[in-house]
Amino acid sequence: MRLRRLPGVRQALLQHSRWLIAEPEKLKNGWRRYAGPGREIHLELGVGRGSFINTLAQNCPGIFWVGAELREEVLLAALKKAASWEAPNLVFLWLNIEQIPAVFGEGEVDRIYLNFSDPWPKNRQTKRRLTHPRFLAGYRQVLRPAGEIHLKTDNREFFTFSLAQFGSQGFTLQEVTADLHRDPAKATWGLSAQVMTEYEKRYTARAQPIYRCVAIPGDF
Ligand SMILES: C[S@@+](CC[C@H](N)C(=O)[O-])C[C@H]1O[C@@H](n2cnc3c(N)ncnc32)[C@H](O)[C@@H]1O
């Protein structure tokens, strides 16, 4: 699971072990019990410095939040945020998103957030995009029936690609917008539309449009 090592950062990560699941594969098929009875499990993939997931976890204490991130230096910032408010309903995974199906059992996740995923613009990089069919198959496996994927991006090409993949892989699309913060419908959508990520704040400050959609496996 450990992919890169920066001197000292690993030690710093381990100091926040209450919020970092060391061997998440061991929780496979046990996440519902771990989260607590009746609690939904929401998973953000590529949390960066973690301000989005920390804000949502504070606002939704009845939901259990899991954040996945590969880069230890930004993960450390996310862990520190969780420690600063003693988050009781939030944990992080230090891993590559490729491993998600090895960590969660079938239907163990209620919702997935993909916020400003790396767009991998070159044709030869298509397979690395987090909405490539090989990733969508994994998300479908871990999502419960009628679970949701909430996606936001600043990148038009990545958004167009993602809409096409969701369509071809049998996902139903809802709340599709090419300019979230100027869309009157935004007020009727949930917190994931209202709360900005770190990247989103940056792009919005430059008046760049934010693209967003919700994708649901199957027909709804
Ligand atoms: C462009 S940043 C966006 C960060 C944050 N979601 C935001 O909106 O502010 C993308 C993040 O996803 C992480 N990431 C990209 N590919 C990943 C992978 N395969 N596994 C885990 N994390 C990944 C990167 O390390 C980075 O922190």
Image (cartoon, rainbow, N blue to C red):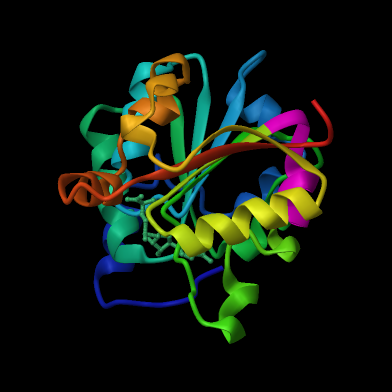
Q: 26 left or right of 97?
A: right
Going 45% across and 55% down the picture, which residue do you hit?
46
Work out whether 86 lies above or below 134: above
Task: List x then y, in percent, for residue 47.
Answer: 40, 50
Q: Is residue 186 above or below residue 204?
A: above
Give the number of marks: 0
Which of the image's four quarters has the N terminus? bottom right
Residue furthest to the left:
205
Q: Residue at x 29, y 55 (%)?
A: 76
* x, y percent for residue 50: 33, 45
Q: Is residue 129 above or below residue 115?
A: below
Where, by quadrant of the figure, is residue 69 drawn?
bottom left
Which image quadrant for residue 101? bottom right
Tell whether 194 sits left or right of 146.
left
Q: Quadrant of ligand 1?
A: bottom left
Q: Is residue 57 above or below residue 153?
A: above
Residue 22 left/right relative to 205: right
| Residue farthest along the bottom direction in this orientation | 124
Residue 142: say if magenta: yes
Whether residue 53 can be seen here: no
Which stretch is magenta? 136-147
Q: Nearer the viewer, residue 63 or 24?
A: 63
Name which residue lies at 35% across and 26% down.
Answer: 194
Where does the C terminus fall, quadrant-wise? Answer: top right
- Given residues 179 and 79, the one toward you in this image is 179
Query: Where is residue 20 shown, x and y percent of the image?
Result: 44, 47
Question: What residue is rendered at 39% in x and 16% in y?
Answer: 187
Q: Residue 165 at what x, y percent from top left?
A: 71, 57
Q: Is residue 116 visible?
A: yes
Judge by depth and name the residue closer to the eye, 166 or 115.
166
